[in-house]
Image (cartoon, rainbow, N blue to C red):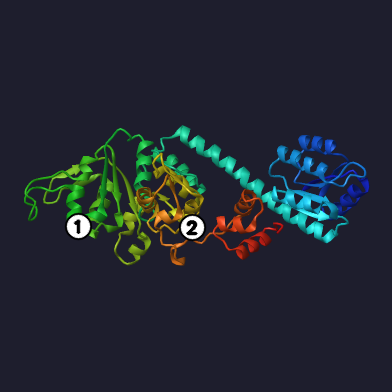
């Protein structure tokens, strides 16, 4: 796609020279000889960048006309990159406008290579910003559609990874297919199981949960299939199992990787035939149950070690939903933290930045605990980074690469003060300069 630039300058020779320069470099360029004409063109057409003069009236050198035009363009399009064409007399004015968001300034007479370098960098960044903006709008539309069409069980999400997962989950929820939810501890696998049930034909039927990881191996079979009195020492009375209790509904088997091989064999039989016997009984029971299972283990590795049956794995894994760890869903972190906060507390910018940088080995569960503890310890209504009590050693911090949006927003907020902007991002001044250079942001 060819980029399009608008040059606003009362000197037609300047416009002609720039048109030739950009034409040679495959960039479409149009010209306006007055601020009024330039603003009219901006209202009627889309441009990727504006190059504007600072003076339009003969013998005027103050730069005030350019300043007024700059703010008028900003009112039309807050994100459009603007390069200021200045004489040395307007250098101070240009620097002031840079602090207010102008992309760059070029002194007359300009050097073609320097101007082209700035233009190409800014066009690339603007294209990226526009793509990000479109992506955010599309995300909002998809998110709202999902919330309208399905019961999301109060799930808080703002990350693309979670949106994709939930779109898949809601699609398969209405089927009878067995679903395997994989992901680390504390990521919210049980919540996904709740969503599957809430949007299924079994929503009003029994929903029974079993955590196989919380039961001794010798008791798991009795828990799942029931037990008759006297079946083993301590079995003083008969008890219905979870499969019988879930008949007609859904059974959620968490930590399925902990199921012993004997239990796996019985589970496979139930999935294949719907039949089982209680521990100590020869009487066959028949049920119709949809099984949703979850694990934080790598079942393929367990199969290779002979600890998990491959045929059972294929039965359970008709549909796999992989729930990513919190560090792979960075846009979820602050919204979740806000959700866990009580109404009379808030998070400082520093606290939010630390939350996004922390690696969260305990995932959503750890985040909830951290926020709950910070609420109790924070002296005021605002929770600071120090109130979070997080270990900030390098090993506990997730790698975080700042985007151009992060850098420009920090600079805008601090009126171009690099030291203050760097501090707000937790960077040194030198590290801030490196990122500014990387993105072609004028120092």
- Residue 249 location, quadrant: top left
How far across and down, in percent of the image, does residue 368 sit?
37, 49
Can residue 165 be seen at all in this image of the molecule?
Answer: no
User: What x and y, as percent, mark residue 8?
Assistant: 84, 44
Image mark for residue 216: 1
Residue at x 44%, y 53% (from the top left corner): 326
Q: Is residue 204 above or below residue 349?
A: above
Q: Left or right of 149: which side holds 401? A: right
- Front residue of 427/25: it is 427
Q: Which mark is residue 188?
A: none
Disc 2 and disc 1: Cα gap in Å? 38 Å
Q: Does residue 174 lie above or below 216 as drawn? A: above
- Residue 127 left/right relative to 236: right
Dot 1: what SS? loop
Residue, x 21% and y 45% (percent of image)?
Answer: 242
Relative horizontal placement of residue 304, taking residue 385 as reference (left or right) = left
Is residue 347 visible to the viewer in this orientation of the structure?
Answer: yes
Q: Secondary structure at mark 2?
A: helix
What residue is rendered at 43% in x and 47% in y?
A: 337
Q: Nearer the viewer, residue 153 or 126?
A: 126
Sequence-earlier tag: 2 or 1: 1
Q: Position of residue 273 (x, y in %)?
A: 26, 46
Q: Is residue 105 left or right of residue 262?
A: right
Residue 432 percent coordinates (x, y) = 62, 61
State which quarter of the image contains the C terminus: bottom right
Question: Mark 2 Cα within 10 Å, few/some/many (few <14, many 20+)?
Answer: some
Tell me the residue that label 2 is attached to: 357
In front here: 254 or 101?
101
Name the front one of labels 2 and 1.
2
């Amino acid at each position: 796609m060819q980029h399009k630039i608008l040059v606003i300058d009362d000197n037609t020779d300047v416009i002609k020279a720039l048109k030739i320069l950009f034409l040679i470099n495959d960039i479409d360029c149009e010209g306006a000889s007055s601020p009024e004409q330039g603003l009219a063109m901006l209202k009627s057409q889309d441009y990727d960048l504006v190059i504007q003069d600072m003076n339009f009236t003969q013998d005027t050198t103050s730069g005030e006309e350019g300043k007024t035009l700059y703010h008028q363009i900003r009112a039309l399009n807050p994100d459009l990159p603007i390069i200021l064409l200045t004489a040395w007399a307007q250098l101070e004015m240009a620097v002031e406008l840079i602090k207010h968001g102008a992309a760059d300034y070029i002194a007359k007479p300009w050097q073609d290579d320097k101007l082209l370098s700035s233009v190409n960098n800014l066009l690339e960044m603007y294209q990226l910003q526009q793509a990000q903006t479109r992506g955010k709008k599309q995300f909002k539309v998809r998110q709202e559609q999902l919330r309208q069409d399905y019961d999301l069980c109060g799930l808080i999400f703002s990350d693309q990874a979670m949106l994709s997962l939930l779109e898949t989950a809601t699609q398969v929820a209405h089927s009878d297919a067995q679903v395997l939810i994989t992901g680390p501890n504390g990521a919210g696998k049980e919540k996904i199981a709740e969503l599957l049930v809430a949007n299924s034909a079994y929503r009003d039927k029994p929903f029974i949960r079993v955590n196989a990881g919380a039961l001794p191996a010798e008791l798991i079979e009795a828990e799942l299939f029931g037990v008759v009195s006297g079946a083993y020492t301590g079995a003083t009375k008969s008890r219905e199992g979870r499969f019988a209790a879930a008949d007609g509904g859904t059974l959620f088997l968490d930590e399925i990787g902990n199921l012993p091989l004997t239990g796996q064999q019985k589970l496979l039989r139930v999935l294949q035939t719907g039949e089982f016997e209680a521990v100590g009984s020869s009487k066959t029971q028949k049920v119709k149950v949809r099984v949703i299972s979850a694990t934080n283990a790598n079942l393929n590795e367990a199969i290779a070690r002979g600890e998990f049956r491959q045929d059972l794995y294929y039965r359970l894994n008709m549909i796999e939903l992989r729930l990513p760890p919190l560090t792979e869903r960075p846009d979820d972190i602050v919204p979740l933290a806000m959700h866990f906060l009580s109404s009379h507390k808030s998070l400082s910018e520093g606290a939010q930045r630390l939350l996004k940088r922390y690696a969260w080995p305990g995932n959503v569960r750890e985040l909830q605990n951290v926020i709950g503890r910070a609420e109790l310890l924070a002296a005021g209504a605002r929770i600071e980074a120090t109130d979070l009590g997080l270990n900030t050693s390098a090993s506990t911090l997730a790698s975080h690469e700042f985007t151009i949006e992060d850098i420009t927003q920090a600079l805008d907020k601090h009126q171009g003060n690099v030291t203050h902007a760097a501090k707000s991002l937790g960077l040194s001044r030198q590290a801030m300069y490196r990122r500014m250079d990387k993105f072609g942001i004028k120092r």
